[in-house]
Image: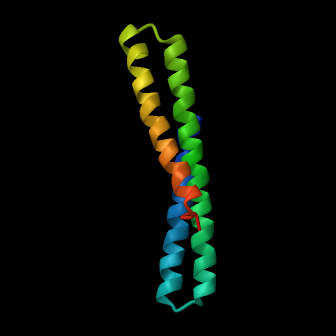
Amino acid sequence: MISDQRFEIARQLRCAAESLNVLIKMTGSGQPCEEVLHQIYAVQLALRATGTRLIICRAQNSQAIILDSHSRKQRLSEPKRLQSLYTILLQYSRHRRDGFHG
């Protein structure tokens, strides 16, 4: 994964963490349920976008390894990582399709 992509993903996760801390404070201070739920939905969307970005970055990294690595062992192990990534992607999309996305 390219360091710029890692930096951006980490930045997005820090923003989501800050939003979760705000949600905790909102809940503790008795904010209306509708406002809290709206913010929860916004955090879910942000995390979903970050997860998607992470999956894309990992797939691009795998592609580069398969195409460019001089190590045969590394090239041969990468399809297994891609298979694992694909399984996670299926679970991720199934989770969304089943109505658990907010």
Number of disc labels: 0
Instruction: Estimate the x, y position of residue 68 in percent, counting from the top left.
Output: 53, 11
Residue at (51, 90) in percent of width and height: 29
Name the residue nearer the viewer: 98 or 4.
Answer: 98
Report which quarter residue 98 is drawn in.
bottom right
Residue at the limit of the structure toward the front, as seen here:
98
Q: Is residue 72 above or below residue 44?
A: above
Instruction: Estimate the x, y position of residue 91 in percent, counting from the top left.
Output: 48, 48
Residue 91 can be seen, yes or no:
yes
Instruction: Estimate the x, y position of residue 75 in percent, counting from the top left.
Output: 43, 14
Residue at (62, 60) in percent of width and height: 45
Residue at the limit of the structure toward the left, as seen here:
73
Q: Is residue 80 above or below residue 24?
A: above
Residue 1 can be seen, yes or no:
no
What coloring was used for the rendering? rainbow
Residue at (36, 12) in percent of width and height: 73
Name the residue nearer the viewer: 97 or 67.
Answer: 97
Residue at (56, 35) in percent of width and height: 57
Left or right relative to 72: residue 50 = right
Image quarter of the C terminus? bottom right
Instruction: Estimate the x, y position of residue 99 in percent, counting from the top left.
Output: 57, 64
